[in-house]
Image: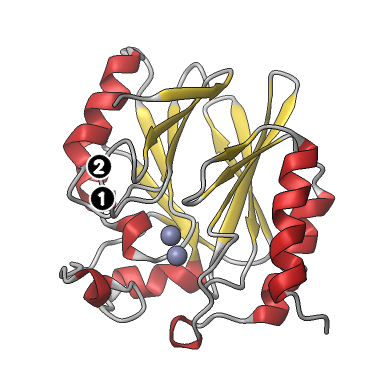
Amino acid sequence: MGAKEIHDGIYLVGSSDITDAKDCCIYLINLGDELVLIDTGAGSSVNTIAANIDRLGFKSSPLSTIVLTHCHIDHVGGAAALRQKYGARIVMHKLDASPLENGDQRMTAAYWYGVKFQPLPVDLAFGGQRHVLSVGSHELVLLHTPGHTPGSISVYIDKSGKRVLFGQDIHGPFLADFGANMKDWTSSMKQLLSLNADILCEGHFGVYQSNKKLTAYIERYLEEYGEDR
Ligand SMILES: [Zn+2]
Ligand SMILES: [Zn+2]
């Protein structure tokens, strides 16, 4: 199955249904002059992901940027091959960049999947709460939203009248072995709700196409797992 358009210039190009059972949801943003990929799947499907991107036909727009929302293998396994194929830079939060740069089999969860994760250099590892990423003439906002992992991030963009939020692994799982922290997660989720986004692109469970659905989705998890400080 090929890519699906979610909103003007925003596509789902990979997922457990579209590319490989082990893959997270992989999203592509066409900014006109450049393309941005959000996450890369577990690694074995990079050729299918690339074919899905190629079929969209953005020949004159290079895939310049790969944003990794966190360090788990189902999100980062394809990063090395896609970085090389497109000459893209890899951007993520510095707290999750070190497991990649060190080839940490435990924190990347690679051992769970029975694969070996080779150390991968991160081109831009940002620190702090918020980073505005310039891509061509556009801006993406990267927010540090720890909880699932210490360096988990969420991404949003205002495009054609809608705010699109890439929240990724909102649903967990939350494992102390992977540095999960429920108090951090609770404040991260409240931060996401306060963005008043119109569309949620989630890490495994697809797309929620209204603020009402997005809010209900996050609030359901907050009711189940939320821990106030
Ligand atoms: Zn995931
Ligand atoms: Zn994860």
Q: Is residue 77 above or below residue 210?
A: below
Q: CA distance from mark 2 to mark 1?
A: 6 Å
Amino acid type, residue under disc 1 in the picture:
Gly
Which quadrant would the C terminus be assigned to in this image? bottom right
Point out the quarter of the image occupied by ligand 1.
bottom left
The reply, left or right, for residue 16 in relation to residue 147 is left
What residue do we see at 21% from left, 33% from top? Answer: 48
Residue toward you, 88 or 219: 219
Amino acid type, residue under disc 2 in the picture:
Leu
Q: Nearer the viewer, mark 2 or mark 1?
A: 1
Whether label 2 touches label 1, CB < 8 Å: yes
Which quadrant would the N terminus be assigned to in this image? top left
Q: Residues within 10 Å of mark 2 (few under 14, many from 20)?
A: many
The reply, left or right, for residue 133 in relation to residue 67 is right
| Residue 103 can be seen, yes or no | no
What residue do we see at 73% from left, 60% from top? Answer: 220
The residue beneath circle 1 is: 78
The residue beneath circle 2 is: 82
When asked about the image quadrant of residue 2, the answer is: top left
Q: Is residue 153 above or below residue 162?
A: below
- Tell me how many marks there are: 2
Residue toward you, 224 or 183: 224
Q: Position of residue 111 (x, y in %)?
A: 23, 77
Q: Position of residue 73 (x, y in %)?
A: 31, 63
What residue do we see at 75% from left, 21% from top? Answer: 161
Q: Is residue 225 above or below residue 8?
A: below
